Image (cartoon, rainbow, N blue to C red):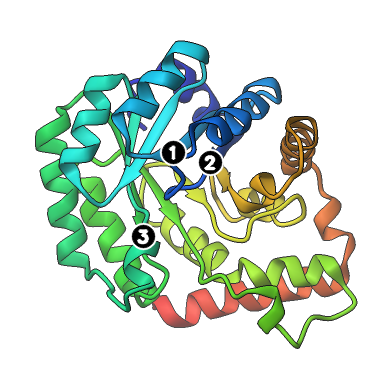
Amino acid sequence: MTLFNNQLYSAFKSKQVVKVIAGLDNNNVSQIIRVVKAAELSNATYIDIIANSNIVNTLKSCSCLPVCVSSINPLDLYNCVIAGADLVEIGNFDIFYKQKIYLNSRQILDLAQETRLLVGDNINICVTIPYYLHLSEQIKLAEDLESLGINILQTESLIVKKSNIHYLSQDYIFDSTNISASSLSSTYAISNSVNIPVITSSGINCLSSSIALFYGASGIGVGSAVNNQLSIYSMLLYIKKLRQSMLSNEVFTSKKAFSNLQLILKDVKQFTY
């Protein structure tokens, strides 16, 4: 594991990373600062924001929390590094998903290579592995990205709005596992194939966060669950609860949830070998 930021290195080494996502299409500075303050007060590891150099400047002047910027534009990432961003992420694919555009592995590798050339060798780069790729393709992409010198990988899931879900059971723990199943499966498969840290994101909450660690993640990324809180205080309480649950076994108190984990593991083995 090669990370150039000492603060990040310690968290990744201990596998206790909590990345708070302020909204990758959110350019509301006052709203971002509220999330940043909650993340800072709750000892989150770092904040992930839109790739906007002006916002990076503002955050670096009012917070000591490491700042990650996410974009699919290498030039935007480079400009944010100049402004003081601590790491960059090739992600925020949602803007393409809304337009029914899906990047293939080659395009993502090209973006990663171009970004590395622009930002240099001493800036950490994270790349999101798209959920829609077959697990074997995800693993191959992860291995290729590791060979390019990418430092961190992130998994994701397709998030379905609650209003469209008609099959939720009475077991909330089980449902939490289902929502993030794709990301958890990818985490398990990828973390067993590369030697760089993996962050599990999309649908992660206080119950599914410990599963991510069980599957080999070095940490989790959480966005809407924090952003939907009504105050800075409720945000920081949620992040603190999230950090505590990552080290607990409360998720396995549900036999149904544990059974679901075994099914996910079975699917991973079936589709990757």
**Do the residues under discs 3 and 2 have CB atoms within 8 angstroms?**
no
Q: Where is residue 97 in the image (x, y as percent from the top left)?
A: 37, 71
Q: In this view, does 23 lie above or below 120?
A: below
Dot 1 falls on a residue whose secondary structure is strand
- Residue that lies at the very extreme toward the bottom in this rendered image: 166
Amino acid at pointer 3: Ile
Q: Is residue 258 above or below residue 170?
A: above
Q: Disc 1 versus disc 2: distance between alpha carbons?
A: 5 Å
Residue at (11, 45) in percent of width and height:
114
- Judge from the rendering whether residue 250 lies leftward or rightward of residue 195; answer left or right: right
| Between 175 and 236, the one nearer to me in the picture | 236
Numbered circle sitting on residue 129: 3
Residue at (70, 74) in percent of width and height:
162
Amino acid at pointer 2: Ala
Numbered circle sitting on residue 22: 2
Dot 3 falls on a residue whose secondary structure is strand
Residue at (49, 38) in percent of width and height:
28
Residue at (44, 38) in percent of width and height:
49
| Between 59 and 9, the one nearer to me in the picture | 59
Crowding at mark 1 (Cα within 10 Å: few <14, some 14-19, many 20+): many
Residue 139: image quadrant is bottom left
The quadrant of the picture occupied by the C terminus is: bottom left
| Residue identified by numbered label 1 | 49
Q: In this view, does 101 lie above or below 236?
A: below
| Between 56 and 195, the one nearer to me in the picture | 56
